[in-house]
Amino acid sequence: MTASLPIASAAARGTVRNRQVTAALVVAFASAGTLAGAWYFQLVVGLAPCPLCLEQRIPYYVAVPVALIAALCAVLGKAGPARVALALCGMLMALGAFLAVYHAGVEWGFWAGPDTCSGAGPAVGGGDLLGQLQGARVVRCDEAPWRLLGVSLAGYNAVIASALVVVAMWGATAKA
């Protein structure tokens, strides 16, 4: 009876490790894929990002290395640090989901967006006023330049980030 206890404990630790590694790799690769998609729409399709779009990328930029650290910790059998890193990933993705919902709400007119990208055109100074106006390019946060099935990129980002919150917390709550 005593001999089977360490085996069960080792099996439980293996289950926790697998769950943490899986969650961390899903968060890392999905975050990197989301960033790749954003860059694709920007560089290939030609959709210039607004300030809110750029802010939504920040949690992903941070989550990729944190998730890879979580995966490394889990592989090395350090369940505690992996748990902390995955919880941090969950919080980052929750922030990303919040920013995406905020941006989608601005696009749908549910609330006002920041003055820097949701109102009048750019502020121009003296000098060549006509030249400044012609050269100014304002990317508005309250106009979705692309939609699929009525949902903008900010809406899809909200779904992706919310799903990654669930995955990260699933890995963070793994216990032997």
Image (cartoon, rainbow, N blue to C red):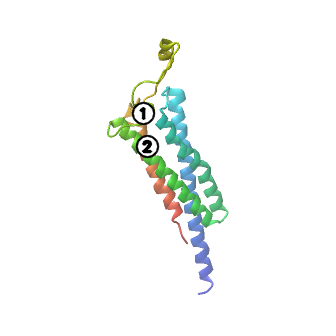
Q: Which residue is drawn at 54% across and 54% down?
A: 89
Closer mark to the observer between disc 2 and disc 1? 1
Could you say which disc has been placed on residue 115 in the image? 1
How far is mark 2 from mark 1, CA to CA?
17 Å
Outermost residue, right side: 76
In this rendering, position of residue 110 left or right of residue 160:
left
Disc 2 element? helix
Asked whether residue 106 appears in the rendered view, the answer is yes
Q: Residue 43 carries which label?
A: none
- Quadrant for the N terminus, please: bottom right
Local crowd size for mark 2, using a 10 Å CA cut-off: few (<14), some (14–19), many (≥20): many
Image location of residue 37, percent across then percent down? 51, 37
Hey, what amino acid is under mark 1?
Asp
Q: Residue furthest front?
A: 126
Q: Which residue in the structure is indicated by mark 2?
A: 100
Q: Is residue 103 above or below residue 124?
A: below
Q: Residue at x 40, y 43 (%)?
A: 102
Residue at the image point whose x is 54% and y is 52% from the top: 26
Total residue callouts:
2
Asked where in the image residue 120 lies, by quadrant, the reply is top left
